[in-house]
Image (cartoon, helix red, strand yellow):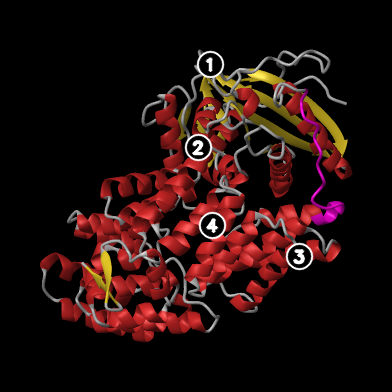
Amino acid sequence: MAEGSRTEGVYEFGDFRLLAAQRRLTARSGGAPVELSPKALDTLHFLVQHPGELLDKSKLIAAVWPNVVVEENNLNQVISALRRALGDGSDGRRFIVTVPGRGYQFVAPVREVSDAAPAPPTAAPAVQATPTARKSVAVLPFVNLTGDPAKDYFSDGMAEELIHILARVPGLKVPSRTSSFAYRGRNADVRQIARDLDVGVVLEGSVRSAGERIRVTAQLIDGATGFHLWSENYDRQFGDVFELQDELARAIVRALRLTLDGQTPPQIRHEPPTHDIEAYHLYLRALASPGPTLAGVQSALELLKQALARDPGFARARSAQVSLRAIALVLDIPLPGTLADTQREVLGDLAGDAKAPAATHAALGMIYAAQGKWLLAQREFQVAIAGDDSDPWTFQNYGLHLLGSTGCLRGYLDAALTVHRLAPGSVLADMNLAVAHSVVDENAAAERYASLCLELGVPQTAAPVCDVRSQLALRAGRFDQACDLIIAGLPPQMGDSKGTEAVRGVFAALESGSGAAAAAAALDAVRTRLPADAWSQIMRRRFMLWYTQLGALDQSFEVANESLDHFARSGTIGAAWAFLWMREMLPFRQDARFQALCRRMALFDFWQANGPPDHCELSAGRLVCR
């Protein structure tokens, strides 16, 4: 039974209002949003829950970064950001006071607002939305208010299934999960989200639980005005989740007064993805597993294996399993089996399902690209896009794994821009744009998106952000900065004195124009002693770039062929080769040995069918680059 709306976790202090459930800070007068990072919001939430209490730094760190080891400086930076946002000065006076040697104290009076005006009863007519709002809705990730972070997966699953249901309503535009979930934990104004995603209405929600019962709250917000259109609460048993999703979707359609060709609102007909509720939970937990890391991928695959053991016909779990294996293999994450094993799984799925999800075709496109079957990869990506041109990650993988690798750089950038249009709040979309702009030598745009990645929480040591920023600094003549950025991102196996000294020698030689031979010899010495587990794709490509910039092309081609030998053992040629087409790699491309490398990567058939890479031409069976 639906109940009236209730607002919880709203704190007022000074000129501000913190809506904890929505992870949003606004001005009390006018409701203008105050931009804060997710961790700053978490810190503020903890502080206002303990007004006047002296909180030592270790307690704050444990609350804001649970189960994560972070430095005290992370907390200091967050406190500084909070003070700037609140207009509190560098040392705090009105809100956050530092107690030297002890911690922090929130000194402003705090009032918790526990009740809001009740929503209209169910029988009351819904607020009339604008014409645009009746045709488009973005479903944001539901907020987990169970008090157990391990149940985030269930809140996500509620939103994801609503996206699946609503996307099948004729005449209703619904952005993909990737697009809307990019705003998780972001202190973004709903009106801005609506503008970003080009929708008229935004659906927000939350999930609470007590034993075997759940309470789901959902509300529709007009994207143009920020006003609430509709809000309801639902109390159900966990086992009734599919019925609840159907009921909620029907209520949303009624609230929007969606009509199709002037007729009555369409009926919601939804077949649950599985009738095994435990298999569904395992699937949702797999999607929530951290990645792409070895531990994250292994955990997710094990959960999907358990889900499929309970329901072998669970198509969505099978598709997720196939996509995950493809991603792991092309990213050089070691798993049992080979790429051919995964290919057989995908082809089996396609053979058994004439209406296979577009994601399955995209996964096969990734596999073919990793095998150097470029024309087959192109076909599968095109089928995937034709089947669903709203999925940003199809375009991401198409650009990164096919177009960028084959040297179609403007096409790669266009695909990256499409990803950003479909998922404007995604940090991965921003990261991809930083790489794409740097490859086409549009440095200002690359710098802008790389900086945005940092603002959104990407560590400055993370690849490829540190590599893009380092190369941009090098192009601008900031040699020391370029060197420091790379050294900060080196793996531990190479971060000792000899490794860092060799890298410093590279940048010193580039700055002075002398000493290249000695710098290359120092890199040779590091190569001979670097353990196998340090040779990730990114490290191999860094060495190729460094050697090429030093004019040591013999060593650069040695590393390139060693890389292909390594990948061949798992049936691949590697993935995401766009860096080969950077302007710094021109001497490498102009060397006669590049022809053999391209043939080894089976690139010529693709170029014969689609034309040569940007800034290159085909002449008498050879690729000529300028």
Disc 1: which residue: 28
State whether the magenta stretch is mostly helix, strand or loop. Answer: loop
Question: How many angstroms separate mark 1 from mark 3 (CA)?
Answer: 57 Å
Q: Nearer the viewer, mark 1 or mark 3?
A: 3
**Residue 272 magenta:** yes
Q: Nearer the viewer, residue 5 or 244?
A: 244
What is the magenta range? 264-279
Residue 200 coordinates in the image, percent (x, y): 58, 25
Which amino acid is tagged 1? Arg
Q: Is residue 55 above or below residue 471?
A: above
Pick whichever of labels 4 and 2 is earlier in the sequence: 2
Q: Secondary structure at mark 4?
A: helix
Question: How many angstroms separate mark 4 from mark 1 (CA)?
Answer: 49 Å
- Density class for disc 2 (Cα within 10 Å; few <14, some 14-19, many ≥20) is many
Which amino acid is tagged 3? Gly
Question: How many angstroms separate mark 4 from mark 3 (CA)?
Answer: 20 Å
Q: Nearer the viewer, residue 296 or 136?
A: 136
Q: Nearer the viewer, mark 4 or mark 2?
A: 4
Disc 2: which residue: 40
Residue 382: mark? 4
Quadrant in which the N terminus appears:
top right
Question: How many angstroms separate mark 2 from mark 3 (CA)?
Answer: 49 Å
> From this viewpoint, is residue 10 visible?
no
Q: Nearer the viewer, residue 331 or 593?
A: 593
**Residue 102 magenta:** no
Q: Are marks 2 and 1 in contact (CB under 8 Å)?
A: no
Pick whichever of labels 2 and 1 is earlier in the sequence: 1
Q: Nearer the viewer, mark 4 or mark 1?
A: 4
Residue 33 coordinates in the image, percent (x, y): 49, 24
Disc 3: which residue: 352
Which amino acid is tagged 4? Gln
Question: How many angstroms separate mark 2 from mark 1 (CA)?
Answer: 19 Å
